[in-house]
Each structure stands twice: as structure tokens, then as C-alpha cells.
């Protein structure tokens, strides 16, 4: 438990269930602490290893920390903005509020009201920024390049997961559901694999509740065409970096995405990417002057087949794009860069 007197930034997490926002907090806070930012989390659903404060500690927010005029409250959801506004405006506590938006849709009137009360707003992509009606700063998410890194021995990485080291592997990672485009990935593999015996495919991720029937139907579809031994449904794993290291090609088939870290995770692992034009995917993959993958229209299985085939049938291009992706993530998307950019906003508010 952290001492509130030594904390300058509070990162609330008012959602019990694991989500992309929660994952962002879990990954960022240790990096922010390592960079000297005096930050702690507040709320449920977070690892005990993170420095945290209790709700009863909020009474201390009437007093600013040593050497600062105020603290910063970094909200990422509506439910975290509202209490901060109450603390600041009604109770006159010494805080300033930052909100990070990942939404790529028109905000409701209530959300616009809350966002309009912020002291600073961060957008996770240029697409997100376009939906905001207030001044904002675009800070793209970064990736932990120590956790996500290339395999030193690709064959051994495959063997360790029970995969055939002689095969090339194309993967799709994330929750198994229609929004994530898992069916598009499966259909593209059904089209591609019969004529490419040296390739296999892996779907790694969990189906929950209403999506279990969706997953079952996909497995039946694969079995019907005789590819059950070449399109593997691996389920959910905690060692997902190991699965990236075993891949030769990654496909991000989402129909919709707020930001989407999977292309970065693949690129940091030295794996080229075929991704739909949703979330921040085009901003992650494009640019840098060297090919790291291709961006295709969303919900277009033919484009997915063509994009994947272009790499599967050209191994020198596959290798070059993987090396370029590794270089791009190391130079432009290390999580330390994201933490520093956010820290600069904190500093401005606490001057």
C-alpha cells in the first residue's frame, strides 16, 4: 500500500473485469514508477504488485503533495471522470483531471459534458482525436519491448508450444468473437492452407458466454473441410509472448477496435502483420519508410486472403517486413516513450 502523502498521480480503475483499459494501467504504471513518476492505482481488479491507495486515503486530497500545487487524477472511463469532478469542483480538493480517450465514435452528450470538464485530454490515435471536440494531445500506446521480443530460435519456440517446428505459422490472437473478426481469419485460412502445405494456423484466445456457440461453429467449419489438424484453437494463455515468438505471420482481422495492441505485440516480436483498417492499426503499421505489414479494408475476407498470400508466398518479403516491424516498434513504440509523453502532461498540470 502506497503512502498518499508521497503520491502525485492517481490512476483509478473502477471496473472489476479485465479490459483493455485495465491492461493499459497494469502495463504502464510500473514503467511510470521506474521513470520517477509518483503514481499509484485506486480500485479493484488490479494486481497486488502495483502501488495502490485506498478510498479512505482520498480525504488527504485537500492537501497538495510536497512541492506541488495539486495532484493529478488520470481517468480513462466516464465512471472515473465523474467522481474526480465532484472531488475537484464540489469538495474543492487539490486535483487536476486528465482523461484518456480511445473511443472512435461520436460521444454521447453526457460523455461530451464530462470530457469538457477535463484539465487535459489525451487521444490514443488520430482517429480518436477526430471525435473529440476539445483540445487534446495524441499519444499512441507503446509496447513492452522486453516482454515482446523475437525468438532467438524460432524452431525451438514452436517446439516448446507443441507446434511443428518445420511448419510456418500464421496466428490470430484475442477474444474469439465476431467483433474481433475470428471468423474472417478462419475463412481466410480455409482458403489459403489447402494449397500451402508448409503453413499452419493458430487461433489463441478465449470465447466467453454468448460467444461459445460462435467458436463452436468455427471449429465445425474447420473440421468439415478437413483442416482440424492445421487450424489450431489454442484457447487462452498467460504466456502469450511465447506464442508471438512462434509465429511467422500475424493477422489482426478485427471489424472494430478502439486502439488494438496486437499488431504492435507481433511487430515487437519480429513478426509481420496483416491488419484491418480499424482502431489505430494504420498508424501503427504504416510509415517509417519500410514495409512492416499491410493494412486491408475491414470485413473483407478476399482482401485478407490476398494480403496474407503476398507474405506466405514470398519468404524474403516476409523476413524483411518482420525485421522492419521490430525496428519500428523499438524506435517509435516502446512503452517508455508513451510513459514519458504522459508524464509531460502531468508535469504541466502540476506546475
Image (cartoon, helix red, strand yellow):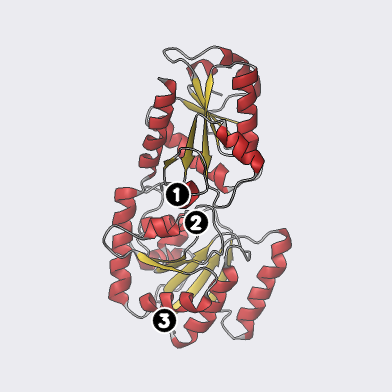
Separation of disc 1 and disc 2 at Cα?
8 Å
**Residue at 58 percent of width and 13 percent of height:** 62
- Tell me if 49 is positioned left or right of 36 in this view: right
Q: Which residue is mark 3?
A: 198
Q: Is residue 110 above or below residue 248?
A: above
Residue name at image x 41 percent, y 81 percent: 198
In percent of the image, x 56 and y 34: which residue is there?
Answer: 116
> Which structural element holds mark 2?
loop
Is residue 79 visible in the rendered structure shown here?
A: yes
> On screen, 23 above or below 93?
below
In the shown orientation, is residue 53 left or right of residue 289?
right
| Secondary element at tag 1 | loop
Horizontal and vertical percent position of residue 120: 48, 32
Q: If the image is split into quadrants, where does the C terminus sit?
A: top left
- Quarter where residue 266 is shown: bottom left
How many discs mark residues in the rendered view? 3
Q: Are marks 1 and 2 in contact (CB under 8 Å)?
A: yes
Residue 77 placed where, x, y %?
Answer: 60, 39
Comparing 242 with 83, the one in front is 83
Q: Which residue is mark 2?
A: 279
Q: Which of disc 3 and disc 2 is earlier in sequence? A: 3
Amino acid at each position: 500500500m502506497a503512502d498518499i502523502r508521497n503520491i502525485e498521480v492517481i490512476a483509478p480503475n473502477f471496473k472489476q473485469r479485465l479490459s483493455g483499459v485495465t491492461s493499459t494501467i497494469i502495463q504502464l504504471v510500473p514503467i511510470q514508477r521506474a521513470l520517477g513518476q509518483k503514481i499509484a492505482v485506486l480500485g479493484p481488479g488490479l494486481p497486488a504488485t502495483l502501488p495502490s491507495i485506498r478510498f479512505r486515503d482520498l480525504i488527504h486530497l485537500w492537501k497538495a503533495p510536497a512541492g506541488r500545487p495539486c495532484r493529478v487524477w488520470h481517468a480513462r472511463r466516464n465512471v472515473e471522470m465523474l467522481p474526480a469532478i465532484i472531488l475537484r469542483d464540489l469538495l474543492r480538493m487539490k486535483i487536476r483531471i486528465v482523461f484518456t480517450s480511445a473511443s472512435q465514435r461520436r460521444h454521447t452528450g453526457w460523455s461530451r459534458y464530462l470530457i469538457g470538464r477535463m484539465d487535459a485530454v489525451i487521444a490514443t490515435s488520430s482517429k480518436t482525436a477526430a471525435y473529440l471536440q476539445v483540445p487534446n494531445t495524441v499519444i499512441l500506446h507503446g509496447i513492452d519491448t522486453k516482454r515482446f521480443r523475437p525468438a532467438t530460435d524460432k524452431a525451438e519456440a514452436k517446439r516448446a508450444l507443441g507446434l511443428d517446428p518445420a511448419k510456418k505459422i500464421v496466428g490470430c490472437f484475442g477474444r474469439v468473437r465476431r467483433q474481433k473478426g475470428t471468423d474472417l481469419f478462419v475463412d481466410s485460412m480455409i482458403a489459403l492452407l489447402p494449397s500451402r502445405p508448409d503453413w499452419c494456423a493458430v487461433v489463441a484466445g478465449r470465447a466467453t458466454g454468448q460467444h461459445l456457440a460462435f467458436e463452436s461453429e468455427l471449429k465445425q467449419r474447420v473440421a468439415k473441410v478437413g483442416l482440424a489438424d492445421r487450424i489450431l484453437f489454442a484457447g487462452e494463455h498467460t504466456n502469450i509472448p511465447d506464442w508471438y515468438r512462434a509465429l511467422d505471420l500475424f493477422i489482426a482481422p478485427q471489424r472494430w477496435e478502439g486502439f488494438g495492441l496486437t499488431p504492435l505485440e507481433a511487430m515487437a516480436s519480429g513478426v509481420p502483420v496483416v491488419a484491418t483498417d480499424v482502431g489505430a492499426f494504420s498508424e501503427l503499421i504504416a510509415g517509417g519508410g519500410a514495409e512492416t505489414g499491410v493494412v486491408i479494408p475491414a470485413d473483407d475476407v478476399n482482401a485478407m486472403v490476398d494480403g496474407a498470400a503476398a507474405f506466405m508466398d514470398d519468404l524474403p518479403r516476409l523476413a524483411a517486413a518482420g525485421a522492419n516491424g521490430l525496428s519500428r516498434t523499438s524506435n517509435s513504440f516502446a512503452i517508455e516513450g508513451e510513459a514519458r509523453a504522459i508524464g509531460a502532461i502531468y508535469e504541466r498540470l502540476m506546475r
